[in-house]
Amino acid sequence: MTSSTPVGRPRNPAKDVAVLQATRDLLVEVGYQGTTVLAVARRAGVGAPTIYRRWPTKEALVEDAAFGHPRPAPVPRPTGDLLADLRAWVQTFLDWLAQPAIRAALPGLLAAYHSDERAYERLVLRSEADVRSLMTELLASALPQAAPEEIAARTDTVFDVLVATTVVRAMTRGHQDRDAFCARTAGALYTLARATA
């Protein structure tokens, strides 16, 4: 007689939580380079094999710790004022990306993505698709006279510039001059959004 019960010990979710928190703590304390799997294992009180069974590489672990929060920052609701809405988007992205653990993780992950494009594509699919569609809705409501293909092109431009500028700003200057940066960037995005609509 065979059993459908899985062989081995069941996975302990508390270990996942401990490993991810240890990873975030180490990123803040010692940076990406110092956040090794062995250091995370020691901090979390687990063995390295436990980590490797869940995350096949350090990059996968850091990505999950930095970007895998169950509740990412909510995208602002549209107000009907496109410039104000874009400024709220810039503030939200900057505040999220400038969190200490994410800010510490980004340089190492970007270097890893350079040699593994599939890893970057995985992150994009995981974190951008739903948000990009919300940007499409925002621009479509603000530019009702624009054709759908024009909205799609504007979305790609505005969203890509939003991500690029906030990532670089978060890594290099964090929240320094936050309000001025958000106002300038929103103005540039507003110009891009309306340029060919």
Image (spheres, grey):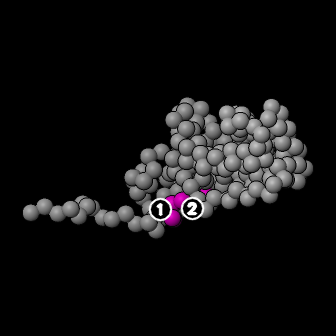
* Mark 2 residue type: Pro
Q: Main secondary structure of the magenta part?
A: helix
| Residue 136 in view | yes
Q: Secondary structure at mark 1?
A: helix
Q: Which mark is residue 70?
A: 2
Among the 4 quarters of the image, the one containing residue 6: bottom left
Residue range of the region highlighted in magenta in the rendering: 17-24
* Mark 1 residue type: Asp
Q: Quarter of the image for the C terminus: give it.
A: top right
Q: Which residue is mark 1?
A: 16
Q: Quarter of the image for the N terminus: give it.
A: bottom left
| Residue 85: x %, y % from top left | 80, 53
| Residue 52 belongs to the span the image colors magenta | no
Crowd around label 1: few <14 · some 14–19 · many ≥20 (10 Å): some
Crowd around label 2: few <14 · some 14–19 · many ≥20 (10 Å): few
| Residue 162: x %, y % from top left | 75, 42
Tell me: 9 left or right of 40: left
Q: Secondary structure at mark 2?
A: loop
The residue under the point 67% across, 42% down is 107
Among the 4 quarters of the image, the one containing residue 46: bottom left
Among the 4 quarters of the image, the one containing residue 59: top right
Q: CA distance from mark 2 to mark 1?
A: 13 Å
Looking at the rendered structure, the number of numbered marks drawn on it comes to: 2
| Residue 172: x %, y % from top left | 78, 44
| Residue 23 in view | no
Vertical relation: 115 (above or below) 69: above
| Residue 44: x %, y % from top left | 51, 63
